[in-house]
Amino acid sequence: MGERLIKISVFYFVVGVSFGLYMSVFHVYDLATVHVHINLLGWVSLAIAGIFYTLFPHLAGTATAKVHFWLHNLGLPAMMIGLALGISGVSNLFFPIASLGGVVTVAGIFCFGYNVFRHLGNRTENS
């Protein structure tokens, strides 16, 4: 689980930096919000979660970790695509999709937080 999250975070890092390069080269900064959220919620947050799950493998084995993984990785792309299309003026219908994706992502992050607070001090293995 930890390695998978770290690899996914690197994908988000590449996408986020590419957005930044695009904005810089073409002087189009409308998607700055998307750029920032991809870097923070994709690259940074998932990398940190991956490190947690690698350092504390008993956290990765919980059902809550699996729920976190799926909610975060389904919600974040929906939020980013919806936000990008809404900001780009394709249709205002994409803003509710972005909001729904945000709610799903936050629910995943809450699962991660619950998992850490509930299980971090409860290891049965010796380390």
Image (tube, grey):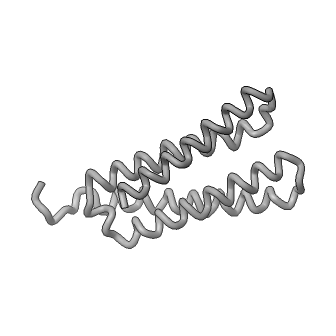
What residue do we see at 61% from left, 41% from top? Answer: 16
Report the residue at 56% width, 42% height from top.
14
Q: Residue lying at the far left in this picture: please name it.
A: 126
- Judged from this view, the residue extending furthest toward the bottom is 63
Q: Compared to 107, does 10 lie above or below?
A: above
The spot of residue 40 in percent (x, y) is 55, 42
- Please tell me how many numbered marks the rendered image carries: 0
Q: Is residue 124 above or below residue 51?
A: below
Residue pictured at 59% horizontal, 64% vertical: 74
Q: Position of residue 11 (x, y in %)?
A: 53, 48
- What is the quadrant of the N terminus in the image? bottom left
Position of residue 37 measured from the top left corner of the image (x, y, whole percent): 62, 44
The image quadrant where one finds the C terminus is bottom left
Image point (49%, 49%), residue name: 9
* Left or right placement of residue 116 versus residue 80 in this view: left
Residue sitting nearer the eye, 123 or 93? 93
User: Percent position (x, y) of residue 5?
Assistant: 43, 55
Question: Could you say which quadrant of the image residue 62 lies in?
Answer: bottom left
> Residue 113 vs residue 55: left or right?
right
Q: From the viewer's perspective, tell me whether residue 115 is left or right of residue 39.
A: left
- In the depicted view, which residue is nearer to us: 7 or 55? 7
